[in-house]
Image (cartoon, helix red, strand yellow):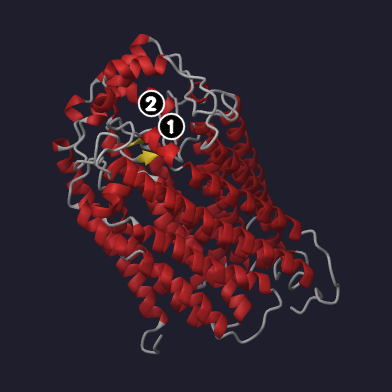
Amino acid sequence: MQYKSQAVAKPYFIAAIALFVGQILFGLIMGLQYLIGDFLFPLIPFNVARMVHTNLLIVWLLFGFMGAAYYLIPEESERELHSPKLAMLMFWVFLVAGALTIVGYLAVPYASLAHLTGNDLLETMGREFLEQPLPTKVGIVIVALVFLFNISMTVLKGRKTSISLVMLAGLWGLAIFFLFSFYNPSNLVKDKFYWWWVVHLWVEGVWELILGAMLAFVLIKVTGVDREVIEKWLYSIIAMSLITGIIGTGHHYFWIGAPEYWQWWGSVFSALEPIPFFMMTVFAFNMVNRRRRDHPNRAAVLWALGTGVMAFLGAGVWGFLHTLSPVNYYTHGTQITAAHGHMAFYGAYAMVVMTIISYTMPLMHGRQANSNRAQVVEMWSFWMMTVSMVFITLFLTAAGVLQVWLQRVATSPLSFMATQDQIAIFYWLRLASGVVFTLGLGLYIFSFFVGGDKAESASQA
Amino acid sequence: MSSSFTKSTARNIFYGGSVFFFLLFLGLTFDTMNTLPKRDNSANLTESAIRGKKIWETRNCIGCHTLLGEGAYFAPELGNVYKRRGPEFIKAWMAAQPTGAPGRRQMPQFNLNEKEMNDLVEFLKYSSEINTNNWPPNIEG
């Protein structure tokens, strides 16, 4: 760590991991509710558990992105952060707002929460992933603006590298597209059309810039490969992300009332969306193979390589699987979508946050890398989480294929609930994989507390 | 990558490509907004249906159900439920929740009054008449 203010990243990363744990616990609850329908009802109905599960995911990833920015922007800009105090203030604002929102979901019926928090003034609630009450949404905008001010000032006053510019562009895009969450027309088709301007243009658009910048930063550090080469890769990858991803939004416009031509635009461009993810895999392996030094933090290198591979599988391959409109006609809104969602979010975004945490946490503790023992534990947790996520995805895919067949293709189609009963075995297997994932996450947290040989952890910076 | 392909080439492709395709996206969006009235059933978007949409949202129905295929996959698709079950069944169903059948998935009781119930059904009727290019493949959703 070269600048003192980079240390503000630490609480952001700790909060991210804590919220990650919450997300997974609610995931387990839902996994069980899929099988034992009345589990925890009416205390925690499924819709509440799901809101908590998905909202915690978004919030912990945002904590991860902000932490990453606070760490890498000063280092890239070669100066201290514009205002570490502001960064810490925003940390507490965001954490308290996030916690209150989750408490609100759990403590009050959603309709009362909507009423209490002023949804009647501006109706924004009750749409998937954008369930947050109005004050939370406004809070997110304020936190984002203050955060962007802070890092933009740092970049403006310091060295401007491609990595920090791409990171900034991604984060500004994130904030700008979030503004569409305030637009909720009563025309359902328009509502859905612009809802994707937040959801799709985030995860298949501007977030990929953030992902690329974070990965490029870590790869420069751990491989020692020339910055010029890495930044050329970064620009090439994100160019392909936006060239394919923006029009690729069309794959969400097949069946929601938008014109038929979206089937062509959406199918063709989103069929190309795996390209940037494939490039990311090639990029990560290529840079590690051409490394000019062996960084002692082997766990961070593993996470970086894993991000490339799993993002390609989850976002690229599993996305392609159901993105062509003739296929999507049958798979839309089934467990196939859930399968893709799980591996894509884990492989691309959860893993890149764990990559940056793995690389920076030892540095913020004043050492180049953790002890060998701690790294071995961390790498075990990598494999447990990653392999069990592969199985979650495979089981949900199997469930989805059967669901499509029984409910939509068979000569005498079954009802939704009758179909669910038929595919329960795969939900059991998914739940078992989820338990293993949780154990892996527990091991991951444990790895932070593994001490070890002082000699190995001595600073070599 | 070959040496003739430099970082600034890559950067220019990024800027040029993003701007070009974003403008194309805006163009397609503009055309979509002009075409929508023919497809989006907005002629039947009555005051009652608009109130129904708000009930749909403030009860977080999307947290279990899908609507035109989007949402959670825990409970049946409701974009075509009006056609599958009809208005009276929907009302009776909601009044009977939760079933309390042991081990089965449970739907909360939302205690809607008759007017709210009618508004919600009106919204589901409006939704079922949107031109979705014949999705879902059959009535089971």
Residues marked 2 and 1, same chain? no
Residue A409: name its quadrant: top left
Q: CA distance from mark 2 to mark 1?
A: 8 Å
Residue B65: name its quadrant: top left
Disc 2 residue crowd, few under 14, some 14–19, many 20+, Cα 10 Å: many
The relative height of residue B22 versus residue A379 in the rendered view (above or below) is above
Mark 2 falls on what kind of element?
helix
Outermost residue toward the right in this view: A454
- Verify CB contact (< 8 Å) between mark 2 and mark 1: yes
Q: Give the residue drawn at x 45%, y 14%.
A: B111
- Residue B56: mark: 2
The quadrant of the image that shows the N terminus of chain A is: bottom right
> What kind of residue is marked 2?
Trp
Percent x, y of residue A79:
64, 68
Which of the two residues, A249 or B85, is positioned nearer the viewer here? B85
**Mark 1 sits on what residue?**
A126
Percent x, y of residue A304:
57, 70
Say whether residue A84 is left or right of residue A189.
right
